[in-house]
Amino acid sequence: AAGSAGQPRTLTAAAFRDAVRAKLAYAVGKDPSRATAKDWSMALSLAVRDQVVERWFESTKASHAGQKKHVYYLSMEFLIGRLLNDAVCNLGIESQVRSACAELGIDYQAQLEQESDAALGNGGLGRLAACFLDSMSTLGIPAHGYGIRYDHGLFRQRFHDGWQVEEPEDWLVSGRAWEFERAEMAYLVKFGGQISFDGHGATYWRADETVKAVAYDTPIAGWRGRHVNTLRLWASRPVEVLDLGRFNHGDYMSAAEKTIRAETISRVLYPDDTTAEGKELRLKQEYFFTSASLQDIIRRYLEDNDDIRKLPDQVAIQMNDTHPAIAVAELMRILADDYRLTFPEAFEITRQCLSYTNHTLMPEALERWNTNLFRKVLPRHMQIIEWIDYHHLAEVQGRNLPVSLDAIRIIEWGSEIKMGSLAFVGSRRVNGVSALHTELMKQTVFKDYHVLYPDRIVNETNGITPRRWLYECNPGLRALLLEAIGDGWVDNLERIEEAAKFATDASFREKFAAAKKANKVRLAAEIERRIGLRVDPSALFDVQIKRMHEYKRQLLNILETIALYQAIRRGPGAEWTPRVKIFGGKAAPGYQIAKRIIKLANDVARVVNNDPIIGDRLKVAVLPNYNVSLAEVIIPAADLSEQISTAGMEASGTGNMKLALNGALTIGTLDGANVEIAERVGPDNIYIFGLTADDVAGLRQRGYNPNATIDSDPTLKGAIDAMVNGTFSPDDHGRFNEVADRLWHTDWFLVTADFQSYFQTQRTVDLDYRDKNRWTERSILNTTKVGWFSSDRTIRGYSKDVWGVEPIF
Ligand code: 26Q
């Protein structure tokens, strides 16, 4: 049925049922009697996809006709997860889809679980990009996401004897309903070779390797399908399909070599979000997708415009961290070498188009490229970066400002390119992702740049999409909110505060608690299914789900678990608040200490869970392969959200927002967005403990000595001792010596410094949880006071402060 944008269309359950049948027969090629669950799921997705496609065409037409400025979000990672239920909910066709499934004799929920989880990202940064796509469609901002279509996303995690084992991920094996290959949308991307000048101003780049970037498009529907944007992911292909010469000579293997070499670029996502190691393939990935995206952006611009100088009027390009920061040099190269603008002109235009989001201040995670490697892979870009560095420095020298020239160099010691500096200098705006993080950017990593460009750094506190992270993943709470306040909150999340007045309403409280309980029963079943552990759904569910990192301090949580275990053993007769500690998270494959901490969690879990003295007072569930789909089951069931990073180190956090929105109370440090969450929920509804970012800086400056702290706290000492005396590793007493040594000697992440405060706060949590009514009241206040953390609000901020675009809704 045709309808204009914004108009709800009618889709009957019967029509949809017939559409699914037709897809099963004519697209999947199966008879209902022989169709597998995967076949049905594919047919269902294809039928839903048709509903999205109509609106997609309209949106594309509307954004061409409207001549609005277009947003391009460049990200190496898009952690989108599954799409079927997301599309169904956004289009508002859930009831029709469910009845159609019932008539066809298939279980909707089971179909959802057939879809592979698209894990084209590591964690927060990639998931943020996915939430932004949802919000840009919901707000009606014409936008494209650009990234890489990895054959293999983030590795799958298994535990072998409690140790993390990585297995390749294979999301494309059974076909993808949501993407369209655009074989005709292809661009050449060059690497290596030589640069020459013809003496008349023209520059030639004779590359020694060329690959083809082929587009795959996924439509992203916003709330109620009013607008649909595109996620365009690039796959790397050889320019020539086969080296027939070699093949004919019987050299079959080497005939395929170029194909393999080319396709390697988009083969696999780098699983390391810890250290920015300067690997050639990573640089090629970064350039590959950035170059293809910029070529595509300029091609689209020139469809409706003829003056390349006016590019910034129509185009805003966002760099998600420095991973696409080569865009600064690539856009200049295209403007100067292909369109024959001068470098100063090209630089001006580039700086008007690009903006950069920083996600970390940790020195080891800031990207740097060795100049020799860089020159080998991207010789022309090396020249351009040298030009930028030289001219930028000269300009600053002329201004006589109180900055250190060494600190603002892009190329350090002539041997390393600092990508953060390149991105900063080439951007119109640079943003941090929480108020605290942005402040620290100004005071630390970008201090000197901030003196030079005091208006360039802005804050855009992260947000999350309430569609996926409440409406879709928490149907019980959704229904309760719809009944109490209608559906205005779904695309205007601050309106969820209208339900705050029910925090003291006995009947609402009861229903809210019942919804939480049902979610906990669901999670308990999932825990039993995955790891065979039975947990009591009325216990306090204490959740820490995030990548394994020393700064995120899973170790602090585990030490507290050990200390609690010891306390229960000493006095099992006391009134303990039953608790289930739930952990989920992957460690980068090369991050040895993080992997050992996973082993520690599993070892502690085994001992605690099998100790008859402990019983249901304490259980530890370490869930393997944490991903978006598992998050959707854990988050709605959480009572307590662990956000316990060393203050000053977590740029923002977004899991903190998801958990609070679903009614978990936070136990956390004053770090990242926790600070802003605390401001909004109020001190009575959050557990803040530990050192502040200032304390941390001061302590580190003075030189922290953990010995005294450990020696003076028997609880802490007892926990660390148990870790090294074999209590949890009877088969290998020394297994955790290195972990303990780090605590005794440097303790860079200040686990010991915060332990006492953390442990005490957890005991307050124990007492508070016993008053179920009061806890539910505070849980409701968390849900209803965090509406500001919608990614819709974040995207409005970018639109106004960074991109200069107007949302159409
Ligand atoms: C860099 C170079 C080479 C290989 C990999 C990488 C790499 C990949 C991923 C570096 C970093 C990442 C991911 C970083 C990340 O997820 N950061 C998180 O971003 C969130 C969204 O802003 C914040 O909420 C988190 O605080 C921040 O840790």
Image (tube, rainbow, N blue to C red):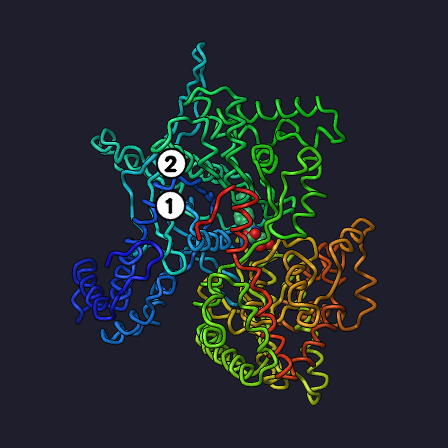
Q: Quadrant of residue 713?
A: bottom right
The tally of labels here is: 2
Identify the element where label 1 is drawn. strand
> Given the image, on which type of amino acid does mark 1 rest?
Arg
List x then y, in percent, for residue 764.
71, 77
147 w.r.t. 31: above or below: above
Identify the element where label 2 is drawn. helix
List x then y, in percent, for residue 284.
45, 36
Residue 29 visible in the displayed image:
yes
The local crowd at label 1, few if under 14, some if 14 to 19, many if 20 or more residues have their Cα within 10 Å, is many
Find residue 232 and name its label. Answer: 1
Find residue 361 and name its label. Answer: none
Q: CA distance from mark 1 to mark 2?
A: 10 Å
- Image position of 117 (left or right of 393): left
Which quadrant: the N terminus? bottom left
The local crowd at label 2, few if under 14, some if 14 to 19, many if 20 or more residues have their Cα within 10 Å, is some
Residue 116 visible in the displayed image:
no
Which one is earlier in the sequence, the residue at label 1 or at label 2? 1
Does the beta carbon of the residue at mark 2 sit less than 8 Å from ligand 1? Answer: no
Q: Are marks 1 and 2 in contact (CB under 8 Å)?
A: yes
- Image position of 451 (left or right of 272): right
Residue that protrudes farthest toward the top in the picture: 199
Which residue position is annotated with label 2? 296
